[in-house]
Image (cartoon, rainbow, N blue to C red):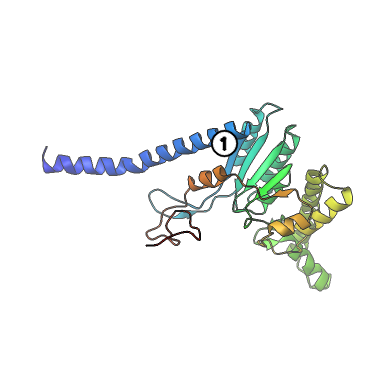
């Protein structure tokens, strides 16, 4: 074999390596999901968003809850018998209200137990989905987030506060129209939160939680900790199965030239001997 043939062979192998690696990763995910399903006797669904990179140009793509996600999750729920529990692994910065609400309502309608696992964070629309669960299992350091609607780049609650602080004669027509939409958006999200919580607490408690989460009490990226979520009355547990972390490890962030975090991936204890 001459030099040019070897060179072509090298390029072919190099080009196929990412594809082979991705296939192996997909297979490992499927094996671990099946293992968790057998252990818990449930349907396991993973809704995990990572920042990804375009294959050729290398531009970062931020993933979020989309209509495609809701269609896929709804199909998985539809394929699950009524007496089979559903375990949803949720890792997301949020996304479309429509898609999040569709997933949440479908989970709420499922007769068997629904558990949502939050190993790191489930913000905005992710929190809306988590509210539909019979149990939310969070890592001790994981967080949820407010579900207050956003209109473009602005929180709906902040748009309404403009009308409270300025005379109407000084507010332009576009802001007035945005305020009308903002009021409707907040009311709609509050109603959804109340409906998702109706079987978990009293009507008064659900309305209070809806007000806290949807009316701009906090900034949209405020991290709601385990303790704060419990104070709200949400059904929180911290008994996270080890398999959840193993599954998360199989959804790696886009590779960088140099990792931002480095450590030796092995357990450490007081008995650890460095000699």
Q: Is the C terminus in the top left, top right, bottom left or bottom right quadrant?
A: bottom left
> Is residue 166 visible to us here?
no
- Quadrant containing the N terminus in the rendered view: top left
- Residue at the spot 87% in from the left edge and 48% down from the top edge: 202
- Please say if 10 is above or below 270: above
Circle 1 SS class = helix
The residue located at (72%, 44%) in the rendering is 135
Most distant residue in the left direction: 2
Residue 252: x and y, percent?
Answer: 47, 49
Instruction: Determine whether 68 is above or below 227 in the image.
Output: above
Place residue 242 in its image quadrant: top right
> x%, y% of residue 232?
78, 56
**Foreground residue among 33 and 157:** 33
Task: Please name the residue that numbered disc 1 is placed on.
Answer: 36
Is residue 119 positioned above or below 258 on the image? above
Q: Quadrant of residue 129?
A: top right
Residue at image coords 78%, 46%: 192
Q: Nearer the viewer, residue 264 or 131?
A: 264
**Image side of residue 80 versus residue 210, left or right:** left
Count how many numbered circles sit on residues in the image.
1
Residue 125 percent location from the top left of the image: 67, 50
């Amino acid at each position: 074999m001459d030099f040019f043939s070897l060179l072509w062979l090298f390029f072919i192998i190099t080009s196929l390596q990412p594809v082979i690696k991705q296939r192996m990763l997909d297979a490992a995910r499927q094996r671990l999901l099946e293992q968790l399903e057998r252990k818990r006797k449930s349907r396991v669904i993973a809704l995990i968003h990572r920042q990804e990179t375009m294959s050729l140009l290398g531009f970062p793509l931020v993933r979020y809850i989309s209509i495609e996600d809701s269609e896929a999750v709804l199909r998985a729920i539809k394929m699950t018998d009524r007496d089979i529990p559903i375990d949803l692994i949720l890792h997301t910065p949020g996304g479309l209200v429509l898609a999040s609400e569709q997933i949440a309502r479908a989970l709420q309608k499922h007769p068997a137990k629904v558990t949502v696992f939050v190993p790191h964070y489930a913000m905005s629309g992710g929190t809306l989905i988590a509210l539909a669960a019979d149990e939310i299992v969070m890592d001790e350091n994981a967080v949820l987030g407010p579900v207050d609607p956003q209109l473009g780049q602005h929180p709906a609650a902040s748009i309404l506060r403009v009308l409270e602080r300025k005379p109407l004669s000084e507010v332009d027509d576009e802001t007035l129209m945005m305020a009308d939409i903002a009021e409707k958006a907040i009311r709609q999200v509050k109603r959804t939160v109340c409906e998702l919580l109706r079987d978990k607490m009293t009507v008064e408690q659900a309305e209070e939680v809806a007000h806290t989460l949807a009316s701009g009490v906090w900034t949209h990226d405020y991290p709601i900790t385990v303790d704060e979520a419990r104070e709200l009355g949400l059904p929180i547990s911290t008994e996270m199965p080890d398999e959840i972390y193993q599954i998360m490890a199989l959804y790696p962030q886009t590779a960088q030239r140099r990792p931002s975090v480095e450590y030796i991936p092995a357990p450490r204890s007081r008995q650890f001997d460095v000699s």
